[in-house]
Image (spheres, rainbow, N blue to C red):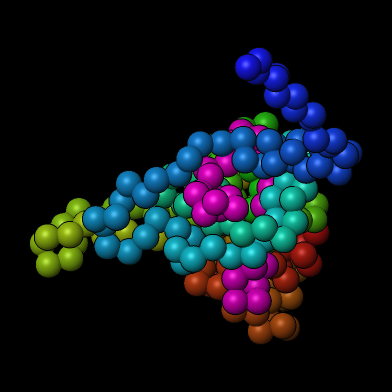
Amino acid sequence: YGVRPLICKALPVNENQQDTLKEDQILYNGEMWRNLYYKVKGDQFLFSKEFSQGSVTINGISFKNILINYDIYNDEVLTPKKDKSVIQLNKEMVDSFKMVIQGKTYRFINAQDDSLPGIKGFVNLLYKGKSELFIKYKKEIQLLAVDDKYDLFYRTYRIYLLKEGIVYQVANKHDLLKVLNEDKTQIKEFIKENKSKISKTEPESFIPVIRYYD
């Protein structure tokens, strides 16, 4: 008996499917993520190990309504695939991303030496006018911090002000007035009239003063 050849016809691919495939290739252009710190107490993420609703822009292309998380220990952005595996996005291609956590939107941009001298990686942009205000979050590991047995993640952050192309670290009212020295008297009056309390524990408290300066 002769064997008849099996003829397979290619399924048609429409433009929408092609576009989706291209977008998936751009979005998932990264490495498979594995948790290497499961023995460390706490976690390496910004606020929670749970994924949050958000969006990301990669090489100018925006992807909205996706789940993302931010590993601030390694400065990496993560997103789950449909098969529940987790991808560590190609950091060099990520322009910016947003996360919505407890109703509050956090916007991060990928800082570069030419735009933010001395700062690298993702920074939380709080204000953008003539000047810019942003936070750089970090997590570090404190060795044997729990019962002298387990290492512990702890979070730190620094607040930066970009003014006339120069980046300054600011932590309190004194630092801010020092940077805005040329208009110090007017700014002091503004702070007094508005009873403004400037504190590192509330980074947004810097914004009204910087907006007034701008």
Q: Is residue 209 visible?
A: yes
Q: Could you tell me what secondary structure mostly forms the magenta stretch?
A: strand
Give above or below for 146 relative to 12. Answer: below
In x, y percent, where is residue 14? 88, 39
Residues in magenta, as a range: 78-106
Where does residue 13 sit, x and y in percent of width and height? Answer: 84, 36
Magenta-span inclusion, residue 97: yes
Number of numbered callouts drawn: 0
Q: Is residue 88 above or below residue 159?
A: above
> In this orientation, which residue lies closer to the viewer: 111 or 10?
10
Q: Is residue 24 above or below residue 138?
A: above
- In the shown orientation, is residue 61 left or right of residue 25? right
Identify the residue at image location x=78%, y=43%.
20
**Which quarter of the rendering shows the C terminus?**
bottom right
- Rendering coords of residue 186 (x, y %): 75, 68
Residue at image coords 52%, 43%: 88
Residue furthest front in the image: 1
At x 58%, y 50%, the residue is 81
Looking at the rendering, which quadrant does residue 43 occupy? bottom left
> Image quarter for residue 3?
top right
